[in-house]
Image: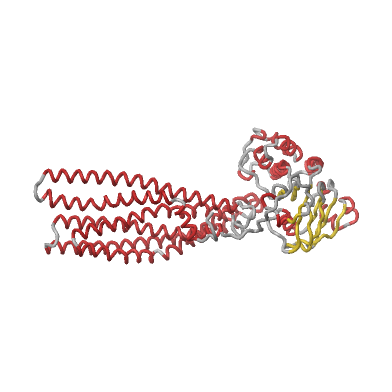
Amino acid sequence: MPTGVPTGGLVLRQAIRGQRRRVITASLLGMTHQGCEALVPVVIGATIDTAVATGSSSALLRLLIVLAVLFLVLSTCYRTSARITEGSGELAAHRLRLDLATRVLDPRGGADANRLPGALTSIATNDARRVGSVATVIAYGVSAVAALVISAVALLRISVPLGLLVLLGIPPLLWLGHRISRPLEQRSEAEQERAAHASGVAADLVSGLRVLKGMGAESAAVARYRTTSQDSLSAALRAARSRAGHEGAVLALTGVFIAVIGVVGAYLAMDGSISVGDLVAAVGLAQFLLGPFQLLGYVNAELAQGRASAKRIAEVLASPEAVGTGHDVPADGAAGHVTLRGVTLGALRGVDLELPAGSLTGIVARDAAAANDLLVCLAREADPSEGAVELDGTPLTSLDPDALRRVVLVAHHDADLFESTLLDNVRAGAADDAPAVERALKASAADDVARLLPNGGDTLLAERGRSLSGGQRQRVALARALAADRPVLVLHDPTTAVDTVTESHIAARLREVRRDRTTILVTTSPALLAVTDRVIVLEDGAVRATGRHTELLAADATYRAAVLA
């Protein structure tokens, strides 16, 4: 990852620096290629003056051999340089994708704040590719500049006025090309922003397709995506028009410049200041200059788009962490005693809780926001604005987030499955512990799911487990959480899509499989709450009642309404 606070310029410099050797090698080869190309019209001019005009066959043969050698060298250098430059671009983009993945997967979080998953995907693909292209075009730009310098030197040898014309005319042309690229950079940034947003909306709609169909909301979803897509298309068209205008302006400036060189060369030839062969060489060099100028226009456009994409990548890399680092590590064999002291965050208001090690506790929160904020605190996805959460007497803020999550596992209600086999999904956090996997499959009734599949547990599941029913997905996700066998396990509504008979079996087995382990059930399921040691009721963001499930059912009408509704 780029050192210091990532900025667009720093991202670009790091991308180039990481491929420095390849870029230098490709630049040298490109300079050799362009130099040989620039020498071709010079050799042709010399052939006219020293061989054709004099009728010397030996001179003609020598110069033809020189031409053949030039073409052999320039062809070899071009192929080798192109292979190296394309490779450097791909490697630079690959390193950026690794940096982005590292930041997104950082246990401290924060990179995905206010960004849809599809938008992050677009940044890691399209924007990384465009920044990687900068490492590719740097060698092209160096080669083009070298071609202009060699051409200017060659023209100086033919005629001082022609050489000075090129040397003095190149800097203003390069400056104008850079100025013309500014609008393209701005519009490219807008284009990528709209494209990323469109990708995010599309991914969001696809993930919720079943819900949309069930609600009959397909037309509203299509209208939403159509609007987003049209915005993206408009931005792309503006960027395309800007690029076309940029390339057209650069080509027009280059054409005028080359025409001036040709006119001056023709005048000098008519005046007798240069020979016919020199005129042919000058005109050939003028035509050759079109290639380097076009190449510089292309390089300018790629740099403009690369700078815009680098800014977007830098924004992700520089995203503030959601939680602090923490340096302590939970002790081996953590007991799992969880304490909340005056915790305030979002909908939570000064929550005090004692969850003893090895206990099975139910938490009922009618307010979904309060339940979510409690899960966020326990998972340390965010730190409380007031108060503290402790594990075995140690504040979570002093613990390393990655080490903490090896002790505390928060299994969210909407947990996704991976596009892999059922057993691979369950084994995801089980450290290849076969007995733990078997116990988890049985406790969650996911073994029944495996028996119904064509290849049992080795059946490949579709993306996010969409080939399973809602209840089957929940059972596999629960099995994965149980198989991880963490000292502290927090389950959020793990059986809402499961039938009542299966839910009762899961409740009975859950207590056994989690014996002597701290388990917290955030749920309103009476079957699950019935097997807990104690139930805590949250209302208006604070603890309102506590007791056993049967006691609360008998004495608390609000509780009855919450769990029996």
The answer to whether residue 361 is seen in the rendering is yes
Which residue is more in the foreground, 473 or 110?
Answer: 110
135 or 305: nearer the viewer: 135
Q: Which residue is drawn at 32% across and 56% down?
A: 144
Task: Give the quadrant of residue 352.
Answer: bottom right
Q: Residue at x 74, y 48 (%)?
A: 331
Residue 418 rendering spot, x and y as whole percentages: 63, 43
- Quadrant location, the N terminus: bottom right
Q: Is residue 174 left or right of residue 122?
A: left
Q: In which quarter of the image is residue 384?
A: bottom right
Residue at (75% x, 49% y) in the render: 490
Residue at (36, 47) in percent of width and height: 81
Residue nearer the viewer, 442 or 221:
442
Residue 230 visible in the picture: no
Rendered position, 429 above or below 157:
above
499 left or right of 302?
A: right
Q: Quadrant of residue 474?
A: top right
x and y percentages locating residue 291 in the rendered image: 30, 55
Q: Position of residue 296 (x, y in %)?
A: 35, 58
Tell me where residue 73 appears, x and y as whole percent: 28, 45
Residue found farthest to the left: 54
